[in-house]
């Protein structure tokens, strides 16, 4: 078998020669230097069967796993300050059970992996899961407004970068201003709407920006918007662009993508943000 050929390519070649040259299994085995069993497998399916998983290797920790699990389960009902550390568990196994053939590192690794599993098994904590986000074209966007340092006329200068990013395509529009006031916040929106040709049909999510949020009542998800922000939203609703919601998120998951790291040294802000405000990607 050619070492540079993948197994999928080998299967494809065997199937091709069997179909075009009508070669037998024995002839195909000799041509490609493989076992007849592999030839039969290739003729059965174009995709190789996955390798069988190797059986787990025995570990020196195995005889003590039930003891470690018992200690960790007992810790569930103990005060936080009285729970066992990995070092304390290891010391107890050595002192009480004569464990002298297991290093601290192996015991620590097992405890680190097993502790969150026990919490989940006993219903004390959520399992570790990944939930992918999905977005429909033109439905949602995210806004962030934060610090950015630029080299302005040879001087490192603090400015403020407004980012309006469409969630589906990642198309982002940027606007740099000299202040982080409410006027600059509104100006960033208007610039983004102009570049994109409209606004999302669903929600625009914010990170509790003070330019839009007056206060957060207690420990709730409710937000009291500023009067000027409410009037700003209402103005765009009246002109019939597209409906816009004041959808505030308690925390914005991640920094908006599609950002830029411009490498230029302007003498004023205007040419700087003009150069980066075009965004990237296709508006969707």
Image (spheres, grey):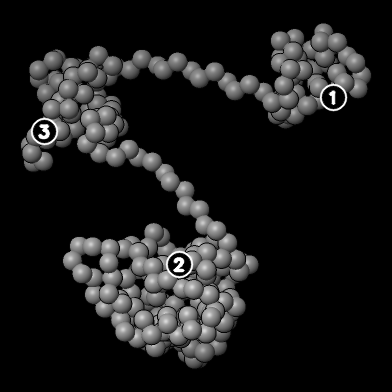
**Mark 1 or mark 3, which is nearer the start of the sequence?**
1
Is 22 positioned to the left or the right of 185 in the image? Answer: right
Q: Name the residue under label 1.
A: 16
* Image coords of residue 180 (percent x, y): 36, 83
Q: Relative to residue 183, is residue 174 drawn left or right?
A: right
Residue 124 spot, x, y in % from top left:
22, 36
* Residue at screen point 13% across, 27% down: 74
The answer to whether residue 244 is visible is yes
In this rendered view, identify the residue nearer to me: 150 or 71. Answer: 71
Give the Cα distance between marks 1 and 2: 54 Å
Instruction: Determine crowd level at label 1: few under 14, some 14-19, many 20+ residues with C-alpha closer than 10 A.
Output: some
Residue that appears at 74% across and 13% down: 40
Tell me which numbered mark, 1 or 2, is placed earlier along the sequence: 1
**Residue linked to disc 2:** 203
- The vertical placement of 23 against 263, above or below, is above
Mark 3 Cα-neighbour bin, 10 Å: few <14, some 14–19, many ≥20? few
């Amino acid at each position: 078998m050619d070492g540079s050929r993948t197994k999928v390519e080998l299967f494809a070649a065997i199937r091709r020669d069997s179909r075009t040259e009508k070669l037998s299994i024995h002839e195909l085995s000799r041509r490609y230097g493989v076992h007849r069993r592999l030839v039969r497998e290739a003729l059965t399916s174009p995709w190789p069967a996955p390798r069988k998983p190797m059986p787990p290797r025995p570990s020196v920790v195995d005889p003590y796993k039930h003891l470690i699990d018992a200690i960790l389960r007992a810790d569930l009902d103990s005060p936080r300050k009285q729970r066992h550390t990995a070092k304390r568990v290891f010391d107890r196994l050595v002192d009480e059970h004569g464990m002298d053939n297991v290093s601290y590192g192996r015991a620590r690794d097992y405890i680190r992996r097993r502790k969150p599993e026990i919490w989940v098994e006993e219903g004390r904590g959520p399992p570790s899961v990944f939930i992918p986000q999905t977005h429909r074209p033109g439905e949602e966007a995210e806004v962030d407004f934060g610090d950015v340092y630029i080299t302005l006329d040879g001087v490192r200068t603090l400015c403020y970068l407004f980012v309006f990013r469409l969630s589906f395509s990642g198309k982002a529009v940027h606007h740099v201003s000299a202040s982080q006031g409410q006027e600059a916040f509104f100006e960033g929106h208007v610039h983004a709407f102009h570049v994109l040709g409209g606004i999302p049909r669903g929600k625009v999510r914010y990170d509790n920006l003070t330019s839009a949020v007056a206060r957060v009542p207690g420990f709730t998800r409710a937000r009291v918007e500023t009067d000027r922000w409410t009037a700003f939203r209402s103005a765009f609703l009246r002109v019939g662009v597209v409906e816009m919601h004041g959808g505030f998120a308690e925390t914005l998951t991640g920094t908006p993508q599609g950002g830029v790291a411009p490498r230029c040294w302007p003498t004023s802000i205007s040419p700087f943000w003009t150069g980066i405000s075009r965004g990237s990607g296709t508006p969707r």
